[in-house]
Image (spheres, grey):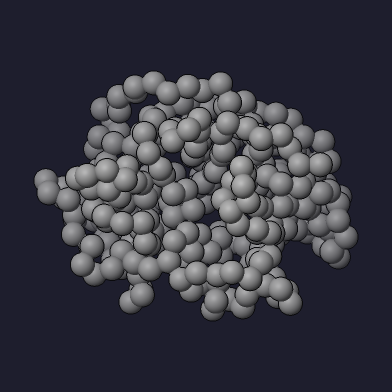
Amino acid sequence: MNPPRSNCRLHILLARDSSEAVIIKRGPSKQVQLIAWQRDTDKFAPGQWFNGRIYERRCDLSPSGKYLLYFAASHKPPLYSWTAVSRPPFLTALALWPKGDCWGGGGLFIREREIYLNHPSHQMDLAEKNSLPKQVKVARLNEQAGGGEDFPIYHLRLLRDGWRTVDNQESLPEEKINALYHSNLPIIYKKTRPTNARNRYEGANLSMSICGIAEPNNPWYIVEYQVEGSGGAVIKKLGRLDWADWDSNGDLLFAKTGRIFRSKDLIESTELVDLRTNLYQEIAAESWAKQW
């Protein structure tokens, strides 16, 4: 049975070298909020809101979790859309690259202060009155940068963070997933549980299947998850979720209907936070979030 519809959707970015995480909460309506999540204590800190769209699958978190690279659109002049770097859970830009359209955009942190942008060459200039510290390096993702929508950034981020594509008769080969657009579904990714997990499901895999696109009255991507044993047997069907991943300690983390859950044994789960009641409010960036 599918979960009931929620007035918000969640996407989480996990820092790969720390316990930091950032939640991108979309909704209600066309409003987005950032929330900081300290995974070792499961403490949450609400951050700034944005009236518009943040394309969460074109965003990235630096290895330490200190910086967020995000692609946003107001769909209004003067910028229409842009890629920026901020200090989460705030959106105030430390650096901003005007985009002007919604092809490409966003990028990846290659290292803590090295960024690859998914922008064409003519959209690589910083906005006026913006500058970068000398130690921050920025380059284009590749010669084809600036094309596509959520792919290729989302695909490349998944691969970097330990997911792998699964050869499937219905799935696209790797070079097609990385192309401008795709239509053959499902696309299946799997990620093995970290080796420091301590229970009988060592070597389990989290399977993510992108099963559909643009289903009426539902998220743009229809994504289903399940946990499988090392031999492929299904341990637990999770069904449709907003997001799921392994924590660095082997716990299963997942989000659905505006809530975030943690499962230590892969069977029972504990609700960590319910974000459905968060409502829009003006929040100013703190002074530390306005500097590199």
Residue 168 higher or lower than 1, as above or below: below
Q: Is residue 268 visible?
A: yes
Please state if 39 lies on the left or on the right of 251 as rendered. Answer: left
Q: Residue at x 82, y 36 (%)?
A: 268
Which residue in the rendered view is the most extreme toward the left?
129
- Along the viewing direction, whichever of 46 and 185 lies nearer the viewer: 185
Residue 289 sits in which quadrant?
A: top left
Residue 93: % across, % down: 27, 41
Q: Residue at x 28, y 31 (%)?
A: 288
Residue 92: % across, % down: 29, 36
Q: Quadrant of the N terminus?
A: top right
Q: Residue at x 40, y 43 (%)?
A: 53
- Along the viewing direction, whichever of 47 and 203 lies nearer the viewer: 47
Residue 116 sits in which quadrant?
A: bottom left
Residue 271: % across, % down: 70, 29
Q: Is residue 95 visible?
A: no
Q: Quadrant of the C terminus?
A: top left
Q: Residue at x 27, y 56 (%)?
A: 99
Residue 266: % across, % down: 80, 44
Please state if 163 lies on the left or on the right of 117 as rendered. Answer: right
Residue 158 higher or lower than 31, as above or below: below
Please state if 9 lies on the left or on the right of 35 as rendered. Answer: right
Residue 251 higher or lower than 42, as above or below: below
The total of numbered circles placed on residues is 0
Which residue in the rendered view is the most extreme toward the front?
216
